[in-house]
Image: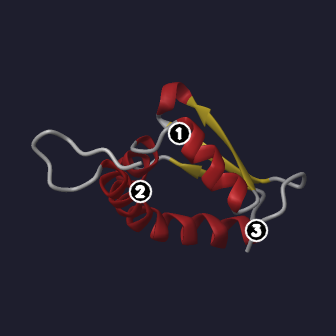
Amino acid sequence: MKFACANCAEPMEDRHLRAIMEKTKGLTGLRDKIATRLAVKSEVFIQHPAELRVLRSMSDQDLRAFAAQHGWRIVRRVGGRQVEFYNDAAVRPNT
């Protein structure tokens, strides 16, 4: 069942899907950076404000699902000013 806002011509499902796609656009470069670094090192620290902004735009559940999808795990540190990514041996990537 599709619900629409009282003043919106677009169904709620479509707006939610578009919001997820916009977040994914910001994640493409970050995903590549993390994958490249984790291929060489055991951990990656994300500290740059622009990169953290992309990660903060996602809910914690979405961020953990994103990491698990690629075979990573995340740890938030330093009061949210740093996010660490690690290869997770218990999770196999879907790709």
Element type at mark 3: loop
- Which quadrant holds residue 36? bottom right
Horizontal placement of 56 versus 82: left or right?
left
Please give the label number shown on residue 82. 1
Please give the label number shown on residue 94. 3
Element type at mark 1: strand
Q: Between residue 10 and residue 42, name the one nearer to us.
A: 10
Answer yes or no: do the residues labelled 3 and 2 have beta carbons within 8 Å? no
Mark toward the viewer: 3 or 1: 3
Please give the label number shown on residue 20. 2
Horizontal placement of 5 versus 54: left or right?
left
- CA gap, disc 2 to disc 1? 23 Å
**Mark 3 belongs to which amino acid?**
Asn
**Mark 2 belongs to which amino acid?**
Ile
Quadrant where the image shows the C terminus: bottom right
Please give the label number shown on residue 25. none
- CA gap, disc 3 to disc 2? 19 Å
Mark toward the viewer: 2 or 1: 2
Label 3 environment density (alpha carbons within 10 Å; few <14, some 14–19, many ≥20)? few
- Residue at 75% in and 63% down: 41
- Residue at 14% in and 39% down: 6
Residue 76 sits above or below residue 24 on the image: above
| Residue 27: percent from left, percent from top | 46, 62
Label 2 environment density (alpha carbons within 10 Å; few <14, some 14–19, many ≥20)? few
Examine the rendering and report whether any part of residue 13 can be seen: yes
- Residue at 54% in and 28% down: 78
